[in-house]
Image: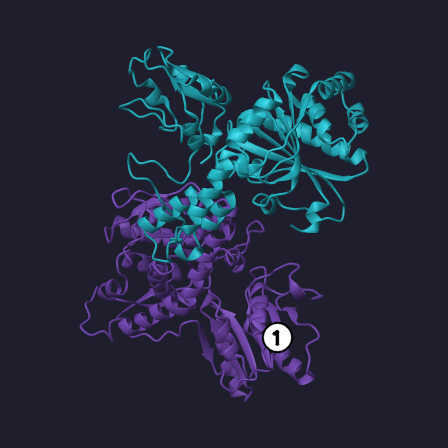
Chain colours: A purple, B cyan
Amino acid sequence: MTKSTTKVVSIQKHNMWTGSRAVAEAVRLADVDVIAAYPIRPYTGIMNALAGMLAKGQFSAEYVICDSEHSQFEVVKHASAVGARTFVGSSGTGLAYGTEAAIVTALGQVPVVGIVGCRSLDDPGNFGMEWNDTFLFRDSGWMIGWAKDPQEALEMVLVAYRVSEDPRISLPSFVALDGAAITHIASPVKTPTKENVDEFLPPYKPLYPLDPLYDPVAKAIHIAPSLIGPEQRKVVDVAMKRAKKEVIPQAWKLWNEITGSNYPTFIDEQYIDDADYILVSMGAYSKNVEYITEKLRAKNIKVGSIRLRYFRPFPADELRKACENAKAVGVVDFSYSFGSPFYGSVLFNEIKASLYGMKNSPLIMSFIFAGGREMIIEDLEKAANLLIKGVKAGKIEKPVRWLTLRGEDI
Amino acid sequence: MSSELEELSWITIHGRGVLNTGQASLVASILAEAGFASGRESYFYMRYDDAPERVNLPFIYYVVYGNPRVRIVLPEEVEPVGNIFDVVVVLDSSILLQPTSQRALLLDGAKKKMKLVVNTSLSPDSILELIKKYQCAHDWEGSIITIKAKKYDPNISFGMIGATLKAIEDKVSMDNVFDVLEAKENTNEKIQAVTQAYEEAKSVDVKVMAKECEPFKLISEMVEKYKKIPSPALQPWNRETYESLKKRASDAPTYELRLQSMPRWEVLAPGLIEFNPKPREKNIGYKTSFFRSFRPVCNKDLCVDCKLCHIYCPEGAIDFETNEINYDYCKGCGICASVCGSKAITMVSEVEALEDLDEEEKLTIKEALIEYMY
């Protein structure tokens, strides 16, 4: 690894890496102590890369091969409670199997960092990209960041460690990577230097480790509802509010200072100052959304785009500010929520709730790309045109559209 | 007290452990069905946070007769407030000797004219004496009904139903119970048990003024004193804060004050941290003496100091050096008595232990008061 002399040019090395490989590099740089492994596409790629690094002696960690996703999450929960920095990951129905352990990880405020390689909740054999596996955790107390490409995935994992382990919040983080689109597609990745990472990421010191050498404590004690039920929930609630207000913005500011990169904190905006139409998305396909935005701008159509970098805590205030002058907002969403309000998708309903009660609240549409089928540029053009048509007509008859569907969309 | 609550009639059934749970459930279901047969809206339920699968842990069943338009009242809303229960049924008389927080659930919620039905071989007068010594916290002009239910039915349920009927004659008649029993098996035996128990149960009217009773004076003094202790200030979480809060909650003389003394969210450590007692210290926040219906008593003359009781005690309640049994944490499981080679340890019923008070030896009244109530 090259050693840099100045901070600004510290990101030097270029590698053609998949998202999986890039995340493995982040785990190495963060000097993780315990890694829980159980194969599932796309987490297998990260497992392989880490196992290779350990075999070559590039860093040392406890690499626990578990018997299931449930054990995976149990292993990291307990390792983290005794004071180890941990890494875990899964996707799809495997992640759903680990839910019992993962939920308690958040309520017990154990700062585990995990990867979700977004994958459809398995109709047998469906490994397409869908967000519903991550959305299973939207109410649980895990912070959820959404990376755009392998480069951001690497840096988001490093920032996630600093944010999670901050004693002001002490909450676990998921970094969501769109399956295939990030995890299996290689693109140039610049790695930060070990010195920069060490400067950014202090060693993990839990407030009260489960270690009798410090002080005999118990963790995740029995809770009688009449005694401290609501109080315990409030502690997690306040931690999430602190993460949104202080910890995440400070962490990204510091990361930008140290590495010279230029990441926005919660939302990434394109052309929104005078935009009439705004497309909102997350993850890898927001690159397609940016592309279509530029294409339509070339035709003098006032389109803008927003990419959410965090789903939990949800950047509602930033979103409201960005959509102040918009006439219509379209949500590009790779999820479904059967029987939800207006039969829209998960992200659509979150955004609709965020924009409720604005002075000139924009029309809002849900574009559903469910079932893991690849979205193509034509679909996005169709989506933008539907928004434009709706604004011209003054109302939207049918706010929820399945754009990759064969057959009538009723 | 809302008027809605007053329209309901409540029966509470207290017992301990697995065996009593089945019996209480049978009593409650038949009384509730009889309520239906009498034309009332009735329901019964077990207190939601009870865990009676643990040996000897006390539990409560509720039977409610009332107006169908009245909302269901959750037990947690009921517990701390008084003037609710019409009839209190006790399947295990050692329950009458609970420590404060449990006792609040037993008699503090009762109406002034409450009727108490106890499964015991003691006479109503002895029960009254027990209550005066250990229980009474408010005025009471009701009656005590005692019965040895095992005499009528090996599974005490039908004996208890017969005795309880004496207390709820104005709401449910014997015929209503017969209607219910006729739909079940072995009807004649059950009807006979119920009728006989109804006739033979001893009833005594009582009039107790709380202010004349020692426990009431003690409780009111303690409440006064407790309220003068300032609440700890909101401060960063650490072992000292935690222990002071825990001590304050466990010292609370009433259930209501105990709930008020539990920590606010601002002082909870992230991630459900509990500071455990350091080695050789005891947990001040959670004593388990109310699990016990029998207590181990050691005869030091027979003891050969083999330490088997210390090794086998699952609660760590027996001291290694002195072999003293810590009755704050002993759950009365009896393992020490069964492993004791020299038969120095015997299990004594809690009620018997108290009845023997006059013959001194074991406990003075003062000690018993401190142990069982406060």
On the image, numbered disc 1 is attached to which residue? Answer: A364
Q: Quadrant of residue B123?
A: top right
The residue positioned 59% from the left and 73% from the top of the image is A356
Look at label 1 and name its amino acid: Ile
Q: In which quadrant of the rendered image does the C terminus of chain A lie? A: bottom right
User: Does residue A68 appear to the left or right of A400 in the view shown?
Assistant: left
The residue positioned 48% from the left and 29% from the top of the image is B291
Is A275 drawn above or below residue A26 in the view shown? below
Residue B11 image position (x, y, % from top left): 67, 35
Say what secondary structure mark 1 lies in. Answer: strand
Residue B194 image position (x, y, % from top left): 73, 21
Q: Quadrant of residue B296?
A: top left
Q: Quadrant of residue B132?
A: top right
Q: Is residue A248 visible?
A: yes
The residue positioned 57% from the left and 35% from the top of the image is B106
Residue A360 image position (x, y, % from top left): 60, 82
Q: Is residue A39 visible?
A: no
Is A218 drawn above or below residue A248 in the view shown? above
Residue A87 image position (x, y, % from top left): 36, 53
Q: Nearer the viewer, residue A124 or B88?
A: B88
- Report the label total: 1
Q: Nearer the viewer, residue B261 or B116?
A: B116
Is A204 drawn above or below residue B139 in the view shown? below
Which residue in the rendered view is the most extreme toward the bottom?
A: A300
Subunit bearing disc 1: A
User: Does residue B46 appear to the left or right of B284 in the view shown?
Assistant: right
